[in-house]
């Protein structure tokens, strides 16, 4: 379940070197080459799944467990003040590498980084319409 044209498959398999923080049979956790902050890491499954939608449920469970473990280790080791987990799916959502990955981004007071969105102001009726659309009522 590898994609021979995928750089993250090669990194996860150890064919391309990376700064590895953790490895087991199913995952490799590496430092991001273009970090938002010191300690910015990526959780990569060793098998190729393009995004969250194709990631099997049991892998998804392991990803969040690993995010907690590695996020805590990074935060403690680097004395971070906080942490963002970020996971992009689709080009419009900012995904640039189409092999599932979870970002672990330690945050420091006044680090100048912005991970956010422009909040909307929907009415209660509008929110109810959205709720119905999603749950299929
Ligand atoms: P995305 O935008 O798809 O959510 O995130 C892709 C991330 O992968 C970016 O933060 C980028 O810096 C990182 N990245 C891209 N290519 C490489 C690489 O070859 N090695 C490492 N370690 N990180 C990479
Ligand atoms: Zn891949």
Image (tube, rainbow, N blue to C red):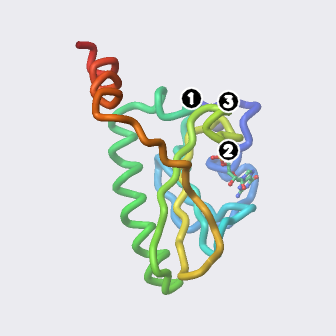
* x then y, percent, for residue 33: 74, 62
Pointers 1 and 2 in contact (CB under 8 A)? no
User: Considering only vertical position in the picture, is 100 above or below 4?
Assistant: below
**Secondary-structure class at tag 1:** loop
Q: Spatial distance from mark 2 to mark 3, Cα to Cα?
A: 9 Å
Q: Spatial distance from mark 1 to mark 3, Cα to Cα?
A: 7 Å
Q: Relative to 8, is 133 on the left or the right? A: left
Disc 1 marks which residue?
Answer: 1
In terms of depth relative to the viewer, which is nearer, 76 or 20? 76
The CB of the residue at mark 1 lies under 8 Å from ligand 2: no
Q: Relative to 35, is 21 on the left or the right? A: left
**Secondary-structure class at tag 3:** loop
* x then y, percent, for residue 11: 68, 50
Pointers 2 and 3 in contact (CB under 8 A)? no
In terms of depth relative to the viewer, which is nearer, 94 or 18? 94
In terms of depth relative to the viewer, which is nearer, 108 or 5? 108
Label 1: few (<14), some (14–19) or many (≥20) C-alpha neighbours in 10 Å? few
In terms of depth relative to the viewer, which is nearer, 22 or 127? 127
**Secondary-structure class at tag 2:** helix
Q: Relative to 131, is 6 on the left or the right? A: right
Q: Which of marks 1 and 2 is in front?
A: 2
The CB of the residue at mark 2 lies under 8 Å from ligand 2: yes
The first of marks 2 and 3 along the sequence is 3
Disc 3 marks which residue?
Answer: 3
Quadrant of the displayed image that contains ligand 2: top right
Disc 2 marks which residue?
Answer: 8
């Amino acid at each position: 379940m590898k994609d021979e044209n995928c750089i993250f498959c090669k990194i996860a398999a150890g064919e391309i070197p990376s700064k590895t923080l953790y490895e087991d049979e199913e995952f490799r956790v590496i430092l991001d080459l273009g970090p938002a902050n010191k300690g910015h890491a990526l959780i990569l499954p060793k098998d190729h799944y393009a995004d969250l939608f194709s990631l099997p449920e049991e892998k998804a469970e392991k990803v969040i467990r690993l995010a907690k473990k590695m996020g805590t280790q990074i935060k403690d080791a680097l004395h971070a003040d906080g942490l963002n987990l970020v996971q992009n799916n689709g080009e419009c959502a900012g995904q640039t590498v189409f092999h599932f990955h979870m970002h672990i981004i330690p945050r420091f007071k006044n680090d100048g980084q912005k991970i956010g969105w422009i909040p909307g102001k929907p009415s209660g009726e509008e929110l109810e319409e959205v709720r119905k659309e999603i749950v299929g009522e």
